[in-house]
Amino acid sequence: MASYKTIAALERAITKCTACPRLVAHCTTVAVEKKRAYRDDNYWGKPVPGFGDREAKLLIIGLAPAAHGANRTGRMFTGDSSGDWLYGALHKYGFANQSNSTSRNDGMVLDNCYISAAARCAPPQNKPTTSEMNNCEPFLKAELELMKPTVVIALGRIGWERYLKAAGWWTRLAPKERPPFGHNVSTEMPDGNRLICSYHPSRQNTNTGKLTRTMWEGIFGNARTFLG
């Protein structure tokens, strides 16, 4: 994987990636077939780069673009219910200038916050394979190296694991020394940075009550406290 001098260069490289044929085919097919509700939309249909303040000290790591969310709009967590939860909380705690995210041209601006993901293409059944996430890992590693965030919010167990691997902690720490995953489990890492774990705001979690608004917003309140 090439080295990148800036986040902007990294974002451009992500959109051109064709490392995973299965994902490339799926994104393209979804963009052509579309969802009836969005049949008049011009789907993005390719890898989705990170989004936000390129000098941010808060990095959020999700799972992957949704087929009719970010794969449609071309921006992380934009155009679906998970994005409604995320941007609503970011706005409440001063990381976003508005609470609704509907398109790349809706005026959304993030302050001291950047949104990334374990996988950059929408996967079938929302399940990227391990090898596909491994192909994406250098992108996350480059974001960590270029941005040097001091607080990381990992959404879901996959976001937690992929952060630990990209940051090198998975191999440097013995299994019993790795920070545990759990909702709102906050760990100071050996380098002094802060890792906050959260359940993912998927409908599977929000519709069942496994993740409530209070639980969710507490994550961002804690992040704001750590960042000052």
Image: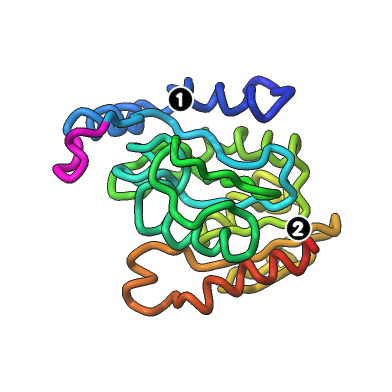
Q: Secondary structure at mark 1?
A: loop
**Range drawn in magenta:** 34-41
Q: Is residue 52 left or right of residue 23?
A: right
Q: Quadrant of the C terminus?
A: bottom right
Question: Farthest residue in the left direction?
Answer: 36
Along the viewing direction, whichever of 150 and 36 lies nearer the viewer: 36
Please name the residue that numbered disc 1 is placed on.
19
Task: Name the side, left or right, on which 94 lies relative to 119.
Answer: right
Magenta-colored stretch includes residue 38: yes
Q: Which residue is mark 2?
A: 173
- Please say whether residue 227 is visible from this viewpoint: yes
Position of 118 compared to 121: left or right?
A: right
x and y percentages locating residue 202 in the rendered image: 39, 62
Q: CA distance from mark 2 to mark 1?
A: 29 Å
Q: Amino acid at mark 1?
A: Ala
Q: Quadrant of the N terminus?
A: top right
Residue occupying image coordinates x 33% and y 67%: 204
- Image location (x, y in percent) of residue 13: 56, 22
Identify the amino acid type marked 2.
Leu
Which of marks 1 and 2 precedes in the sequence? 1
Residue 201 at x, y percent in the picture: 44, 64
Examine the residues drawn in magenta and state their main secondary structure: loop
Q: Give the residue displayed 18% in from the left and 42% down from the top.
A: 35
Quarter where residue 193 is shown: bottom right
Vertical position of residue 119 compared to residue 201: above or below:
above
